[in-house]
Image (cartoon, helix red, strand yellow):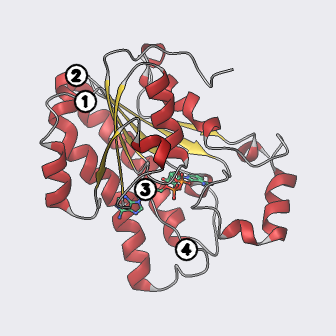
């Protein structure tokens, strides 16, 4: 069964950070399956082969303001921007320089892309989906920069929702639980951590990237027309325990 059955026929979707087959790629595939024209980006020179065959791909560093502006200038109208680009390095985030780098990619990068695409989003009366995290609300001793960046992404979502409501733009976030992707590969090398997440998650498992796509499509769809500034947990119940 598909994750969701929404109709995005004719819509233009931009997914930032969809190159590694993780959550961004799953969201791009969901919008593609729903009929949209999907554009994806990432830090890598190439996306996953199946996505290269389907979507327009651009290598784009979200910390490069001029590059982000130049990319955005190619769009007259964008129905949905999904901000998925992020980094984390468990155990290395007490180093001030790396802390700043994480904030620059995860928080300022999301803002850069949204700000640069604001005119195109306004033209379509579109919406933005930011990707937060459980670590936006819970402390993480080994990922302090990541947690701070994601809490700020959630807060930024609220502020942009208010700022851009007069333009007809909705801004929401999804907070995934623990998902099997390249980003979590390092943490998943620790069997005790893997088991602890499974034990705490009422659904009893780690999520897959496809588990997140339905929520992104829903938030971007007319079914969520009265939702803005919200952050939707998609976490197998992790956050309610
Ligand atoms: N995997 C999880 O458990 C989990 C949980 C909560 C939230 N998230 C979030 O989901 C989103 C997608 O992550 P994922 O787990 O699919 O990992 P991923 O590593 O597959 O995706 C991260 C993407 O960010 C891109 N990226 C990294 N640095 C960049 C830069 N400087 N410029 C542009 N792009 C850059 C990568 O190229 C990649 O496409 C991220 O925001 C992540 O924080 C993941």
Q: Secondary structure at mark 3?
A: helix
* Residue 97 seen anywhere in this rendered image of the structure: yes
The quarter holding residue 213 reads top right
> What kind of element bears circle 1?
loop
Classed neighbour count for the residue bearing mark 4: other residues with Cα under 10 Å, few (<14), some (14–19), many (≥20): some
Q: Quadrant of residue 152?
A: bottom left
Q: What residue do we see at 42% from left, 34% from top?
A: 229
Question: Could you give the CA–CA distance between mark 4 and mark 2, rounded to whole angstroms?
Answer: 37 Å
Q: Please provide percent x and percent y for residue 232.
A: 56, 35
Q: Is residue 49 left or right of residue 105?
A: right
> Which residue is found at the position 59% from the left and 21% from the top?
4
How crowded is the residue under tag 1: few (<14 C-alpha within 10 Å), some, or many (20+)? many
Query: Mark 2 or mark 1, which has the lower sequence index?
Result: 1
Disc 1 target residue: 78
Residue 110 in the image: state x and y as whole percent.
34, 52
Above or below: residue 152 compared with residue 55: below
The residue closer to the viewer here, 106 or 226, is: 106
Q: CA distance from mark 3 to mark 1?
A: 24 Å
Provide the residue designation for mark 3.
Answer: 152
């Amino acid at each position: 069964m598909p994750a969701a059955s929404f109709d995005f026929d004719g819509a233009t979707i931009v997914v930032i950070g969809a190159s590694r087959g993780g959550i961004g790629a799953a969201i791009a595939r969901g919008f593609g399956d729903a009929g949209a024209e999907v554009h994806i980006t990432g830090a890598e020179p190439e996306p996953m082969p199946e996505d290269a065959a389907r979507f327009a791909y651009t290598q784009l560093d979200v910390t490069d303001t001029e590059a982000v502006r130049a990319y955005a200038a190619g769009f007259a109208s964008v129905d949905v921007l999904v901000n998925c680009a992020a980094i984390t390095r468990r155990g290395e985030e007490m180093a001030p320089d790396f802390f700043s780098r994480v904030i620059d990619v995860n928080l300022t990068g999301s803002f850069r892309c949204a700000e640069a695409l604001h005119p195109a989003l306004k033209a379509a009366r579109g919406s933005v989906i930011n990707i937060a995290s459980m670590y936006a609300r819970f402390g993480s001793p080994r990922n302090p920069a990541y947690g701070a960046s994601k809490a700020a992404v959630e807060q930024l979502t609220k502020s942009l929702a208010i700022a851009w409501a007069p333009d007809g733009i909705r801004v929401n976030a999804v907070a995934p639980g623990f998902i099997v992707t390249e980003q979590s590969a390092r943490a998943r090398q620790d069997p005790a951590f893997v088991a602890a997440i499974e034990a705490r998650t009422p659904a009893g498992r780690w999520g897959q990237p496809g588990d997140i796509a339905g929520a992104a499509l829903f938030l971007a769809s007319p079914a969520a027309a009265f939702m803005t500034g919200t952050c939707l947990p998609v976490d197998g119940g992790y956050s309610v325990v």
